[in-house]
Amino acid sequence: MAAVQLNGIFKRYGDTQVVHGIDLDIADGEFVVLVGPSGCGKSTVMRMIAGLEEISGGDLMIAGARANALPPQQRNISMVFQSYALYPHLSVYENIAFGPRVRKESQSTFGPRIEAAAKMLNLGGYLDRLPRALSGGQRQRVAMGRAVVREPALFLFDEPLSNLDAKLRVQMRTEIKALHQRLKNTVVYVTHDQIEAMTMADRIVVMNAGRIEQIGRPLELYDRPANLFVASFLGSPSMNFATGQLAARDSGGFALALEGGGQIALPPEVTQGLSAGAQITLGARPEHIDVVTAGGDVEFGVEVIEPTGAETHLYGKIGNATWCVTTRQRASYEPGQRVLLRLPATHLHLFDTASGRRLG
């Protein structure tokens, strides 16, 4: 039985509907990440699961029981917020103990749980400190400790790393993943950061404009995005796109006649079932493009070069679209240089331009 089920859930504010019929089953012990741009409805969905937002329609099931009308305290959940939400006048220990004290648990009952959580989260030396004496990462650990001590069936994380610097974000996402592996609780995690989603999730739910675009394991979504939105959202640098019309080649097969001029030769295995004249958008990830000296599929004019150490990003135009090519070669490139690109058939993505739907 799924730990959490959302059946046709929607949310309306007056005449404005912001979440449109969400269907999602989350298994017991699963780490599910809701990801999407700001305003896509992911935090609203989480707040409806938590009981902080009223559900306008549909059914929310938690552990097999309908939870639409249950108050938050009866849902057996813990939520970690972006803002930490710590009491500034209470010590770390008292912040973590606040929930058990409100529930009138005895010190002998919750004390060992706090000690265990502090050890797990490396807070043992900070229990007497006030929040103002802690770093951002330590404060987020305190918020996590408060959630752990409650021993919930379901953890909800609402963009918990947004206020941290880049290095600390990497460290904290590793710690959250490790915490889940130890506790094996069900986790629903909201973020707009697709790197967090890719590295942490068992399954990713990509949302856009209050709807689910695609659900799947991280690499499934990365390798076979269902539409243009998912393809463009996942990946950093993001997928390259070229839009045009399929044109028959004299030598057989098809080429993509680009809107901004020029053509890209397409391997026959990716155009099966398509016909000349179709309006197509071609997608290729930067790391799946090869820079070659002969036998390329398209010519590329290098405009900007970004060396990062491990790899180099080359930016330039194909048709009227800016493309990025990622290479690990330490070759010397110059702005204005023209190179040949090969687009391996196994890593090409074709989409219907009008609908955005994946083809093939």
Image (spheres, rainbow, N blue to C red):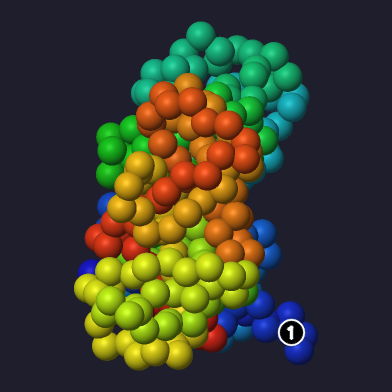
Q: Position of residue 211 (x, y in %)?
A: 53, 76
Relative to 165, is 122 on the left or the right?
left
Q: Secondary structure at mark 1?
A: strand
Q: Which quadrant is home to the C terminus?
A: bottom left
The residue lying at 55 percent from left, 59 percent from top is 318
Inspect this view and state whether residue 335 appears. Answer: yes
Q: Amino acid at mark 1?
A: Thr
In this rendering, the answer to whether 276 lies above or below 255 is: below
In this rendering, the answer to whether 187 lies above or below 63 is: above
Q: Picture quarter containing residue 282?
A: bottom left
Using the image as rendered, state which of residue 227 and residue 164 is in the foreground: 227
In this rendering, the answer to whether 67 lies above or below 112 is: below
Inspect this view and state whether residue 192 appears. Answer: no
The residue lying at 66 percent from left, 77 percent from top is 18
Using the image as rendered, state which of residue 57 and residue 309 is in the foreground: 309
Relative to 183, is 166 on the left or the right?
right
Q: Picture quarter containing residue 20?
A: bottom right
How crowded pointer 1 is (Cα within 10 Å; few <14, some 14-19, many 20+) is rated as few
Using the image as rendered, state which of residue 321 and residue 218 is in the foreground: 321
Q: Position of residue 321 (x, y in %)?
A: 61, 61
In this rendering, the answer to whether 55 lies above or below 155 is: below
Q: Which quadrant is home to the N terminus?
A: bottom left
The residue pinned by badge 1 equals 16
Q: Position of residue 325 (x, y in %)?
A: 47, 45
Q: Position of residue 130 (x, y in %)?
A: 68, 18
The residue lying at 50 percent from left, 58 percent from top is 240
Please, which residue is most extreme toward the front here? 250
Relative to 59, is 3 on the left or the right?
left
The residue lying at 43 percent from left, 82 percent from top is 246
